Amino acid sequence: MLIEQVLPKYDEREYHQIDIRGDRKEVYQAIRTIDFSDSFVIRTLFRLRGLPPISTNLDGLLQVGFLLVHETRDEEFVLGLVGKFWTLRAEILKVNAVQYGEFNQKGYAKLAWNFAIQELAPGTVRLSTETRIACTDDRSRLRFKLYWALIGRFSGWTRKEMLRVVKRRVEAK
């Protein structure tokens, strides 16, 4: 998986999956284009986190600092983000893909977040999402762990809801 190449070592990890009746291309297209802010759960959780009222599709995420780090069309893409996620505004740094890969400045964390599609049988795929976080030093690791103890469940809830939204959209066709 591409996420292995992007962030092979990490301090925290979260993984979720769902099986969908559909083909790889339509699931990939859905995950790239759905506006997740249509979901009350996701819209509410993003507001609670203080994220601006943006479209929470891939383009909207790229506007708030996420970076498309790696992609294999119709199979997987990985988003990256660098910041101090435990602060009120998360102090997101604007970096390009090369800077993201080389980033190691103390006091920050790197996040890699993927969506991957695996064909299980003709007409059935597994859509998974994994989030990995690597902190750059012990102090940021401690701060992130405290933050994650509070926010981790909500992050997981958001990711699971995203998978359900994609499933509903694809299977409704």
Image (cartoon, grey):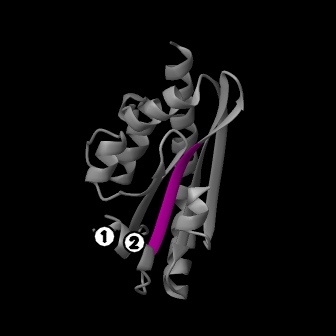
Name the side, left or right, on which 4 lies relative to 59. right
Q: Name the residue under label 1.
A: 95
Indicate whether residue 74 is drawn in magenta: no
Residue 168 x/y as whole percent:
54, 21
Q: How many marks?
A: 2
Q: Between residues 36 and 155, which one lies in front from this camera angle?
A: 36
| Residue type at the position of mark 2 | Tyr
Asked if residue 165 can be seen in this view, the reply is no
Residue hosting label 2: 100
Residue visible at 49% across and 21% down in the picture: 169
Cα–Cα gap, marks 2 and 1: 6 Å
Q: Residue at the spot x=57%, y=63% of the render?
A: 132
Mark 1 nearby-residue class (10 Å; few <14, some 14–19, many ≥20): some
Q: Residue 149's image quarter?
A: bottom right
Is residue 42 or residue 170 the one in the foreground?
170
Q: How would you classify the magenta stretch by its main secondary structure?
A: strand
Residue segment shown in magenta: 108-116
Quarter of the figure that contains the N terminus:
bottom right
Q: In the rendered structure, are the residues bearing label 2 and label 1 in contact, judged by CB atoms less than 8 Å apart? A: yes
Horizontal and vertical percent position of residue 64: 28, 54
Name the residue at the top extreme. Answer: 173
Q: In this view, does 87 lie to the left or right of 41?
A: left
| Circle on res. 53 | none
User: Looking at this view, is 14 or 8 the one in front?
Assistant: 8
Amino acid at dot 1? Val
